[in-house]
Amino acid sequence: MTYGKWEDLMDGSSENRDIDGTNTETGGMASPTGCISGPVAGGAGVYTISIVWRGHY
């Protein structure tokens, strides 16, 4: 999976709905931020994935 695809999934760009004739994005998180850390070469090893988003108050 590419970083771009991962970003699209967090943003919810693939979740759409027709609302009164307008295609509207309806999924995703509010202001998501993701971080992936792992081996420098990107090979086998331990990876840490963190995702945060803005909640509703």
Image (spheres, helix red, strand yellow):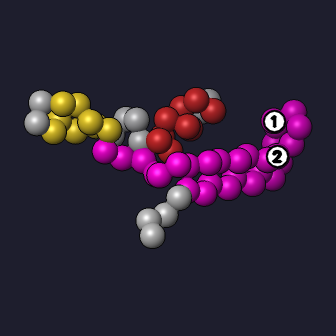
* Residue found 75% across the figure and 54% down from its top: 48
Q: Which residue is mark 1?
A: 42
Residue closer to the observer: 6 or 19 = 19
Residue closer to the observer: 7 or 44 = 7
The residues bearing labels 1 and 2 have C-alpha atoms spaced at a distance of 7 Å
Q: Which residue is mark 2?
A: 38
* Residue found 17% across the figure and 35% down from its top: 18
Q: Is residue 56 above or below residue 11?
A: below
* Residue 36 position within the rendered picture, expressed as x and y whole percent measured from the top left: 73, 46
* Residue 19 position within the rendered picture, expressed as x and y whole percent measured from the top left: 15, 39
* Residue found 54% across the figure and 32% down from its top: 5
What's drawn in magenta, residue-wise?
26-53
Choose top left, top right, bottom left or bottom right for residue 16: top left
* Residue found 87% across the figure and 33% down from its top: 41
Q: Amino acid at mark 1?
A: Gly
Q: Amino acid at mark 2?
A: Gly
The circle on residue 17 is none
Label 1 SS: loop
Label 2 SS: loop
